[in-house]
Image: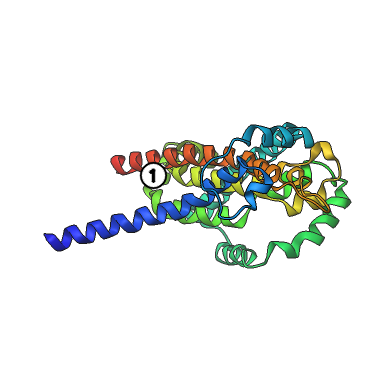
Amino acid sequence: MATSKWKSAFLHAVLIAGFLLSVFPFYWLTVMATRTTGEIYGYPPKLGFGTQLLDNVKRVIDTIDFFGAFANSLFVSGAVALLVLFFDSLAGATFAKYAFPGKKWLFVLLLATMMAPAQLSLVPSFVIMAKFGWVGSFKALIIPGMVNAFGIFWIRQYAEESIPTELIEAGRIDGCGFFRIYWSLMLPILRPALSFLGAFTFIGVWNDYLWPLIILNNERKFTLQVALSSLNGIYVTDYAMVIAGTLLAVLPLVVLFLFVSRQFISDIAAGAVKS
């Protein structure tokens, strides 16, 4: 009994230490956003909150079109996430539960695309967007990202284990077509996987900097990450203002994570109760 208590105490201590290590970077970001640049460089570093947060935030808003860039990022990230959820769930469920010619080799090819670095596709992608006349438009950010290999793989793995084949066969007997089976039978079961994939995709697009920097040439269409990069000066950088802008960009992701994690856990619990 004593050994079991010690093991439990050790496990809790490790979990608490891991939690503190994971939260500390966000805490330190928040602390630095409330300080001046001089205080950030001060030694020893001050771990408490300062009084300059509102001033730093005001200078961010005065320097860049923060709300416009925020709206652009929200639109692009939301559109890509919704399209990925639809197309990847459709393809993943098909790979998992339907037989068709070349299925095995298509899936192998899909996995192979995940091995190539994304940077290799930047030049070909830019050339294609230029041919379509999409350079400088949101279409160049949304259309190429509306399907991704990881999402198909993720949904396929989840659907293969969680969707009973008998359920699909029962739907066919009742006269349901492919899309009716997909919409009414598969999607409710895939909700936990879709919650994760939606959040994962949204965060990835929201944080993307390189592709929007390359493809956008109109300041009114800059995403938040590109707009924030303009806060870095050529000779002198006001790091307090930069960090405050970074904090503003991170906060929506924290809210999204908290919402999606609760939804994900509730969906998993509901599925466990039903099973």
The C terminus is located in which quarter? top left
Please report the residue visible at 47 percent of the width from the left and 36 percent of the height from the top.
184
Judge from the rendering whether residue 219 lies leftward or rightward of residue 195; answer left or right. Answer: right
Q: Is residue 64 visible?
A: no
Q: Position of residue 214 (x, y in %)?
A: 81, 53
The vertical placement of 206 against 100, above or below, is above
Splitting the image into 4 quarters, where does residue 117 fall? bottom right
Q: Position of residue 89 (x, y in %)?
A: 54, 47
Q: Secondary structure at mark 1?
A: helix
Q: Amino acid at mark 1?
A: Leu
Judge from the rendering whether residue 21 lies leftward or rightward of residue 216; answer left or right. Answer: left
Please report the residue visible at 58 percent of the width from the left and 67 percent of the height from the top.
108
Foreground: 121 or 57? 57
Q: Which residue is mark 1?
A: 167
Q: Count neighbours of disc 1 (C-alpha within 10 A) and say few if under 14, some if 14 to 19, many if 20 or more.
A: few
Please report the residue visible at 58 percent of the width from the left and 64 percent of the height from the top.
111
Task: In the displayed orientation, state which residue is furthest to the left.
Answer: 1
Q: Is residue 190 visible?
A: yes
Q: Position of residue 173 (x, y in %)?
A: 41, 40
Splitting the image into 4 quarters, where does residue 85 fall? top right
Q: Position of residue 208 (x, y in %)?
A: 68, 50
The vertical placement of 69 against 151, above or below, is above
Please count the marks in the image: 1
Please report the residue visible at 53 percent of the width from the left and 42 percent of the height from the top.
178
Task: In the displayed orientation, state which residue is furthest to the front.
Answer: 43
Foreground: 83 or 5? 5
Foreground: 44 or 168? 44
Judge from the rendering whether residue 41 lies leftward or rightward of residue 126; answer left or right. Answer: left
